[in-house]
Amino acid sequence: MKRTLLVAVALVLLLFLLPVLLLKAPAEEGEVGVLPATPTPVSSGGAEEDSRDSQTVVRVLLEDGQVEEMTLADYLWSVTAAEMPASFEPEALKAQVVTARTYTAWKMLHGEENHPDADVCTDVNCCQAYLSPEDAAAAWGDAAQEYTEKLWTAVTETDGEVITYEGQPIQAVFFSSSAGRTEDAVEVWGSAVPYLVGVDSPEGEDVPNYHTEVTLSAQEFQDIFLAAYPQADLSGTPDSWFGESVLTASGRVSSMEVGGVSVTGTALRALFSLRSAAFTVEAAEDSVTFQVTGYGHGVGMSQYGANALAQQGMDYQEIVKWYYTGVEVIDRF
């Protein structure tokens, strides 16, 4: 009788305490929570709490002027979402994450005079592009869940890895697509960098807007060019304005004579908003047309080239070492 009473009391206590125990029980190690229908990865939502990226804090200057502290894992997720199509091959996405992490490490080590109170900003012309989880989910639509998880996998499976040259993080610049070969840094910025030299790049005709065209009337060209180079002689018809082009090893315009003035290809690209310095010029009686291939400055890793290499079977470390000469990929953070 006494034993029966004790068992009954124990059962009652268990019924009352079980819900409390279930609510307070910690998740098993390695357990993955179910993501919401509209993914909003915050606070390193896809990274382990003890990962190097989750333990590193980055000060990010946002578009609204506020400086927000966030984990490196969260920052890298948003950079990758903004910088590379999430539909790309997993190994290409990993290469992008490692490149973005390295670029961030380089910025943190060297500082940035444009924003001394922040390690990085979201201005692509200064640092790296950035896309919030909410904006990414809205852009991805029905693929938001898949792409969210895919990018978190790229971040977590490369946790803490950076690209180094002689033991130091490199300035890991990257761009969209080349015209078959990347560019030497010296051709674009005037300074030679041993790990930023031209290499073959396999992207091709399947790149969106791989070939573009910019046409200006003769008057439009004169107005823009003479405002920057008033000493130029643009009398006569456009077909008399252009001299021979000097090309770099990658086929981009190193310099071109226009109206008797030698102008660099990068300067012409900026002046006429061309997608790259890989261009030719066609001058008619009353117009000037630029035929352009690829997109970006051409130095470092080509993103579409990285995806092509991944499709050929390269892993992310092989892709990184393809585009950055003489480097190593190591655990840094």
Image (cartoon, rainbow, N blue to C red):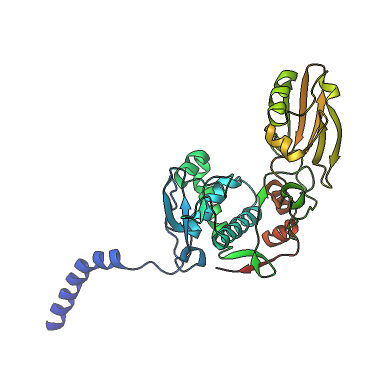
Q: Can see residue 218?
A: yes
Question: Viewer-proximal residue, 194 or 39?
Answer: 194
Task: Tell me: residue 7, above or below residue 281.
Answer: below
**Residue 238 x/y as whole percent:** 81, 21
**Residue 2 x/y as whole percent:** 12, 83
Q: Can see residue 210?
A: no
**Residue 214 x/y as whole percent:** 72, 27
Specify whether 192 is left or right of 174: right
Image-quadrant location for residue 70: bottom left
Give the residue furthest to the bottom: 2
Specify whether 185 is left or right of 25: right
Residue sitting at 13 percent across and 78 percent down?
Answer: 5
**Residue 251 x/y as whole percent:** 83, 42
Residue sitting at 71 percent across and 65 percent down?
Answer: 327
Count of picture labels: 0
Task: Tell me: residue 22, above or below residue 259.
Answer: below
Residue sitting at 58 percent across and 69 percent down?
Answer: 332
Question: Viewer-proximal residue, 321 or 275?
Answer: 275
